[in-house]
Amino acid sequence: MSPRVVRFHGIERTRPLSVITMETDVNISETLTAMETDSAQIAQCEHEIKNIDWISCKDFTIEIGEQQIKQYMDTWEIQQPGWLYSLKFLRETELEFKTQYQYETKWTIPTQTAPIPRATASVYFIIEISKIRPNALPVDVHFLVETNRSKLIPGQTRFREKWLMDVTESKTLLMDTVDF
């Protein structure tokens, strides 16, 4: 293998070509790996998926369910000021292997000019208590945003304020097309 003269920061060295290529490839690979890791960590910090410690099945009550839903919604990164919500318990449903507790939150942005908003967006929460799993395990929780069929799971999904805006804007546009 023929030696090659390499100049780096004013210093000349003579090395075989294969050594230079191998070292360069390793350094580039290490640098790229470090950059990818750094950018992934930054992205994860910017879009952290937040959750709470949900209560165990044995300690669950309807009132605690309401408190925990409020606590979970407090982790949502709502940017636009003025969003208000109401939370109510809808029903308890007994199924073969679980009991479901269903809640509805209605979100809206009242303003001085429109204290009674034209449109609301509902988010439905379902808390499930398993009849076959150990009672010490936490309850299973998922939620659905009105007009969206996706089942969203706390701790696996980052809530987006845009979902609420899309629902309220769609309803407002629909109401504008209807003559009363």
Image (cartoon, rainbow, N blue to C red):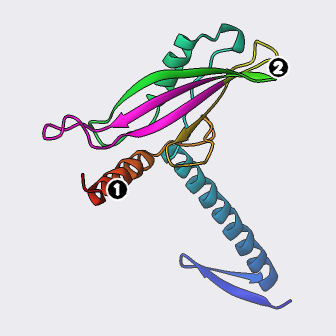
Q: Which residue is mark 2?
A: 133
| 121 magenta-colored | yes
Residue assigned mark 1? 174
Q: Position of residue 167 (x, y in %)?
A: 41, 49
Q: Nearer the viewer, mark 1 or mark 2?
A: 1
Mark 1, Cα crowd under 10 Å, few <14 / some 14-19 / many 20+, is few
| Viewer-closest of 39 and 91 | 91
Which portion, as a residue range, is magenta?
101-127
Query: Does residue 77 appear in this view?
Result: no
Say if residue 37 shows up in the picture.
yes
Q: Quadrant of residue 139?
A: top right
Location of residue 40 in the rendering, given as x and y in whole percent from the top left corner? 59, 53
Q: x%, y% of residue 156? A: 63, 40
Q: Residue at left 63%, top 42%?
A: 151
* Residue drawn at (41%, 45%) of the image: 164
Q: Amino acid at mark 2?
A: Arg
Secondary structure at numbered mark 2:
loop
Q: Amino acid at mark 1?
A: Leu
Residue at position x 19%, y 34% in the image: 115
